[in-house]
Image: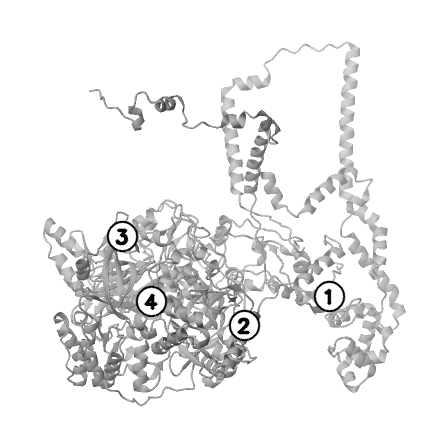
Amino acid sequence: MASNKKYWQSVEELNQNSSIVETLRNNEFAEEIPTEEFLGDKEALSSSSTSRRDFLKYVGFSTAAASLAACEGPVIKSIPYVVQPEEIIPGVADYYATTMADGFDFANILIKTREGRPIKVENNTIAGSKVTANGRVHASVLSLYDSMRLKQPVVSGKPASWEEVDAKVKSGLSQAAATGGQVVVLTGTLASPSTDKIIAEFGAKYPGFRHVVYDAVSSSEALDAFQQVYGERALADYDFINSDVIVSVGADFLGDWQGGGYDNGYTINRIPKNGKMSKHIQIESNMSLTGANADKRIPLTVTEQKYALVKIYNIVTGSSVSVPAVNATYAKAVEAAASQLKAAGSRGVLVTGLDDVNAQLLAIAINNALQSAAFNPAAPRYVRKGDAKAVAKLVADMKAGSIHTLIMNNVNPVYTLPNSADFVEGLKKVKLSVSFALKEDETASKTTVAAAMPHYLESWGDVTIAKGTYAITQPTIRPLFNTKQFQDALLAWSGNPTAYYDYLKAVAPTYVAGKTWNQLVHDGVAVATVAPTAAAALGANYAGAASALASAKPTTGALELVFYTKTGIGDGQQANNPWLQEFPDPITRTSWDNYVTVSKADADALGLENWNVANGGLNGSYVTIEVGGKKLENVPVIIQPGQAKGTAGIALGYGRAAAMKKEMIVGVNAYSIYNNFNAFQTAKLTKTEGEHEFACVQLQRTLMGRGDIVKEATLNDFNTKDVADWNIMPVVSYDHKEVPAASIDLWESFDRTTGHHFNLSIDLNACTGCGACVIACHAENNVPVVGKSEIRRSRDMHWLRIDRYYSSKDTFAEDVEVKESMSGLLDSVEKFNNMEDPADNPQVVFQPVMCQHCNHAPCETVCPVAATSHGRQGQNHMAYNRCVGTRYCANNCPYKVRRFNWFLYNKNNDFDYHMNDDLGRMVLNPDVNVRSRGVMEKCSFCIQSTQAVILKAKREGRTVAKGEFNDACACSAACGTGAMVFGDVNEKEDPIVRLKEDERAYHLLSHIGTQPNVFYHVKVRNT
Amino acid sequence: MSIIIFNMKKVGNHTSISRILLFCLALSLSFTVSSFAQDPAAPAAATTAALAGDAAAAAPAAGAGDPVKGKELFNANCASCHKLDAKSTGPALRGVADKHDKAWLYKWIHNSSEMIKSGDAEAVKLFADNGGVTMTAFPQLSEGDIDNILAFTSQPKEVSAAPAAATAQAGGEGNGGSSNKLILGALVLVLIVLIVMLVLVNRTLKRVAAANGVVYPEAEPTLPLWKAYAKNQFLVLVTVILLMLSGAYFLYGYLMQVGVDKDYQPVQPIHFSHKIHAGDNGIDCKYCHSAARVSKNSGIPSLNVCMNCHKNIAEFAGDKDSLYVDHSKEFYTAEIQKLYDAVGWDKSAQKYTGKQKPVKWVRIHNLPDFVYFNHSQHVSVAGVECQTCHGPVETFEVMKQNAPLTMGWCINCHRETDVKVEGNDYYKKIHDELAKKYGVQKLTAANMGGTECGKCHY
């Protein structure tokens, strides 16, 4: 049937007599092409100096030139030192012991340098080292090469010389001295005896001089409590190694609580030995790293945590302070925790992270009542010293115009202060303001003098992390820019001609006994002359504190907002560090963002949602957070399993904008509502329009009852039952008999008993999910940063990921039961659907996954060009130059650990991260190739380092020393908790042999017969 | 395109082209122009000859001392600080015997610091004039030895005599050196004469035949050869196949050499002659390239390493053995001056000025980024001679890439070379195990896993 439909392009066509339609029909182009104008002008054409013949000549010549030029190899210059420093041999790494102390992170580390460039952070394992490096410390080496750093001093917005700065400051100071104006030095926590001395000497000249210490993320209440009891402004140290029962009330002690660095002692007792392991009970609001590792997690609001703390205090000390009842669901659990703690006696310890001086006092009281062996007030830590009251007073004084000179060092109050508007106003009334800063940040851009300061890798310094210890910070590279240390400047301004290096060298012997200066600089750490002495407890009104705490009123009609710092970004000092931005949060597995976490119940009540879109990306609603009249707009929401009902969590350290690369300006600045430096605020959340696109690297949230991926056992089962019951080895049917899956093989096996055979052991009990290994791997292997939109497309390049799984029921064991109880299609569909959602208070496991280096690798058999092949040392090799990018290997990998370079990630303006500027590329490891577009890459078991260890042994004519291979792999070397151990299973003495034979050992997906060289240890929970 | 590549490799290698040209010229003109065929080493040889002559003549004049022995002693004891005609660490020594009393000189050489201490005016002045540097005492030198040295230092400067002697002897040298070419030339000439004679004879015979009325029979018209060939389809097919095969062969050969820079010989900012340093003077490779022992890089020596020797060697002196020196003395001395300019050494003041500028050498051996090569593995562990890969560097006037540095070349060596396991405890266990496994006593690098991808590519 013929159609009589008429298709028309515009309404005009319907008008039969339209002249426009007629014109269009006759002319191909609606507008006239100006050919006549150009070609018609004969005169212009003939006078043109370029004839058609010339044109052809040019084309021919340029084509020929281009093709000829392409044939010639590039001339590469090689420029040796004119005078080579004695200690540098090109191609050989040098290591320097130093200490990081940026006011937030403190760690004793080694810096690996190549040709004079620091390229990697490693742990200083010499006796006396206090704190191992976390992810941020590992990433700090990249912050050194931040292209947005302040490169010279700036006076009143104009680049200046140091002479001008000195003149300006000196005249200002003499004016202050003459007029009696107040001089104030504002710093972060320094923990540096020599700097404290210099500041005191500097201030002696000025009456009313003050040194105000300001921690962006405050521990002020804990310091106040400790000071009240022990008379010193410090924080008690905790040796979790001496504890069997750990109760934490809102303390994320595996994270950044009171300066962090507690994970090593903690994990030692988490590995079951002789049937025993420690028990860890966590009472908290946000799902923290610590809560995820706990045996028992009790989600409570902050108010209820206070009640719980009083309850525990009552039970442990036998007091009877009246306290409102805790949430009925968890009241029993709290009581059980308290009685377990009491039963443990001196082997029990309680820590709290509540920002309340009364809560902190109770913690001290409880630990003293227990006579806790883990609680160590005799050798307190000095890593936090900030005084919230002093800072508040300073801001008030500035506003009142009574401060003449303000000298700041490595603080950014304009960004971090909740009342930064007041500070900015006060700053205008300050006659002379100086800010020593790494970048021209929010504060430095508003001060009279922005003094460019060197990175800690370019500086001298000393650090006392805890009483009785002393550590040195030494430069590992010449200053990259025209910078000056705060200490040097202060010495000069106080009229002392000594350079800080000489000053430090002179005073160090007074702090250290038994080590010469050279030894001290070599070791990096030493025992201090000031020995830890048990300070007599002054005591405090604990009962009063308890009743004050018990009188806390529950919040009604609003949520309790709890602030935290993320494992990646911390307090935000290193926000311009692409490694840290791309590092997925261990809990939410989301990178490049901060967000507010709410519980499922509250989300439902507020109408907030998270959902996945077609490309797998995670989207979420926005809310406006209102705290005490201040609003934080457009905060994305993540529904967090385990978040206590009635609470919400938000991370500090995001939303920085000054001196940042465009890509790195992400998130919202939660400091603006961090009122009174209290990590607990009452907030009102209201849903707003729009949807947020997250960069979340893990879509699956639950384990779906697949108990063979992360194997778990209770301590009881582990102790009493047969291995086969809790470490179930899969079986397959062969010849009509059930045989162990590992015994069946498609391939002929290869004799691997000769030479080295590398294995990596990962103990799921010791892994806290801290992610130090992820960053160390980044640094060692030149892993590119791909940015938020690529991460969202699941194109992350991390060679090592740490999977996080929630249980769908209260425990993983129940999940398995549900899965096994399924019968029939409909039942299983329904139950599986339910299992996709995590429980309200789920169990959590972390599982680091990298290339498993299968002896029978599925990837190797499918590569059409043999780019990936197996070495006899057990490593799965990847020859990048051979790879043509078919991605068959990634498709055939059951562990999904292969990463494809979808783009060229270096020298590409579309990926403007460190590999796109000359400065950032200085961090690259010269022993590892930088991959280009279209190439597959993956974990290599750090073959460059294992080969280097072997070569070193060969050169010295010896066998490889026991455990020497452990430090070869970046991940196992970075792992402070001992969760990852790397070694040679053919070497009887190597610790890995014992670990491989351990009854907890299992292979991931062992039923598919890939025979991996990575094995895991069953996670045992002390429930 | 191939011309370009050819050029790239020959950058700076002017001498070989000019030698070919020279040879052609010599072939055609060998008798008449002798100077063209002159051996470059001739002046040096002549110089030494002249020197010896002079020395012989001067010996009696110096009296008791023997200048030949004196030269030996001078080189062994004095040369590290003194030169004959230029200031070094110590003053120039030519004619020193005329400046001081002989007995004074004995005392001074035996123990100068003693003399300065005792307040000898002359000694104190000399000490002050030379920047207060104490001269090493030489009590082991007998007075006879010192006489010999003084005899050597008292010899007149012979430089001016050298060029004259060289020109005088040049002719003779030249003739002797090109006797082979002469014979060849003569043979060529004979050949030409024979050909000319043949043509002449042929013409004469034809003329005689014409004169005698001999008539040549008319040749039958035959198919031209190319037409016959074109008609034979089999032949055409065979030829086409052959052409294609050979084309493919050459194309393959051409493609396989793309990016292979064997014989790459760039012009360097300083003309550094490995021939003079490693060959003539026998300096060990690893003296300068010390990093090769412990590092992945062999290391281009930093300039302070050069200055270990060149602080004292400010000018190129040559020597009778350096028959193959390619450039003039002045040329080499100028190159040493370039080193001084870079390192900031003031030759006359014997001081560092502090003005440094790095030398931008052109890198010759360029491995791609995706290949890991470690010198120390090969040099220290395997004990491979540098020359195995880099060729006879001690004969290279201009450094070049000797090996193709292709993967096939690496792998070949790994397959063929036995691992040096003796005396290295690392290999003991693995050697025993592998030897048992393969039933051999010698193990190649490949047996040890040296041909696995990941050993070099990461």
Visible residue check, residue A960: no
Of mark 2 and mark 3, the one earlier in the sequence is 2
Q: Which mark is residue A671?
A: 4
Mark 2 chain = A
Q: How is the image coloured?
A: one colour
Res A416 quadrant in image: bottom left
Asked if B89 appears above or below A515 in the picture, the reply is above
Q: Which mark is residue B347?
A: 1
Labels 4 and 1 positioned on one and the same chain? no
Closer to the camera in the image, A507 or A724? A507
Residue type indicated by callout 2: Lys
Q: Residue at x 47, y 72 (%)?
A: A433
Q: Residue at x 18, y 76 (%)?
A: A308
Res A650 quadrant in image: bottom left
Q: Sort mark 2 into few (<14), some (14-19) or many (20+) by Cα contacts within 10 Å.
A: some
Asked if B265 appears above or below A838 in the picture, the reply is above
Residue type indicated by callout 1: Lys
- Disc 2 to disc 4, C-alpha distance: 32 Å
- Disc 1 to disc 3, C-alpha distance: 75 Å
Q: Are marks 2 and 4 in contact (CB under 8 Å)?
A: no
- Disc 1 to disc 2, C-alpha distance: 46 Å
Of mark 3 and mark 4, the one earlier in the sequence is 4
Closer to the camera in the image, A221 or A458? A221
Q: Quickly name the residue at label 2.
A: A168
Residue type indicated by callout 4: Tyr
- Disc 4 to disc 1, C-alpha distance: 65 Å
Q: Which mark is residue A691?
A: 3
Quadrant location, the N terminus of chain B: top right
Residue A511: x %, y % from top left? 45, 84
Quadrant location, the C terminus of chain B: bottom left
